Amino acid sequence: DINMASDSDEVILYADDEALHPASERHTPFLTALLAGGCAGTSVDVALFPIDTVKTRLQSPQGFLASGGLRGIYRGIGAAAAGSAPGAALFFSVYETSKPLVRSAQERYGIAADRPEVSHMVSASIGE
């Protein structure tokens, strides 16, 4: 469906049609990828922090209870959250920036040009 918005004398068309703008042609802006990556990395690490703490304490040679049990399960979550944001932000921004470049190289050199998943895998490797 196409929506029209009027801005003074010109008419701007907004197309929500996948056929006009397929996902393979869209490009995520660098700043968007940077912020999304930082938020995603922080969210995952904060959500999984207590589970990781319990796992670590279960693996402790002293045993679960002697290493703290469930006490202080969130101790250190701030440092973990602050540390995860930069790495995830960097990964997402490099991944999203390299994806169209890899896809372009695929098409130019005929390397699995009909396989867009290859550009995703290669871009993820570059991001790591």
Image (cartoon, grey):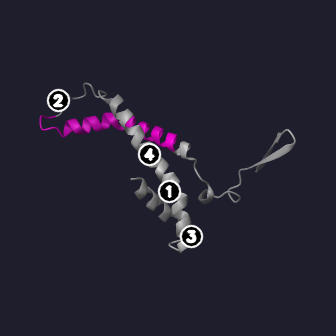
Q: Residue at x 20, y 28 (%)?
A: 68
Query: Contact (CB < 8 A) between labels 4 and 2?
Result: no
First in sequence: mark 4 vs mark 2: 2
26 or 55, nearer to the observer? 26
Crowding around mark 1 (Cα neighbors within 10 Å: few <14, some 14 to 19, many 20+) is some
Q: For the view shown, which residue lies furthest in the left direction?
A: 62
Amino acid type for the residue under numbered disc 4: Leu
Q: Residue 34, how many percent across, how many down?
A: 50, 43
Q: Residue 59, how many percent across, how many down?
A: 18, 40
First in sequence: mark 3 vs mark 1: 1
Amino acid type for the residue under numbered disc 2: Leu
Residue 65 picture quarter: top left
65 or 100, nearer to the observer? 100
Query: On the image, numbered disc 3 is attached to which residue?
Result: 107
Q: Main secondary structure of the magenta part?
A: helix
First in sequence: mark 1 vs mark 2: 2
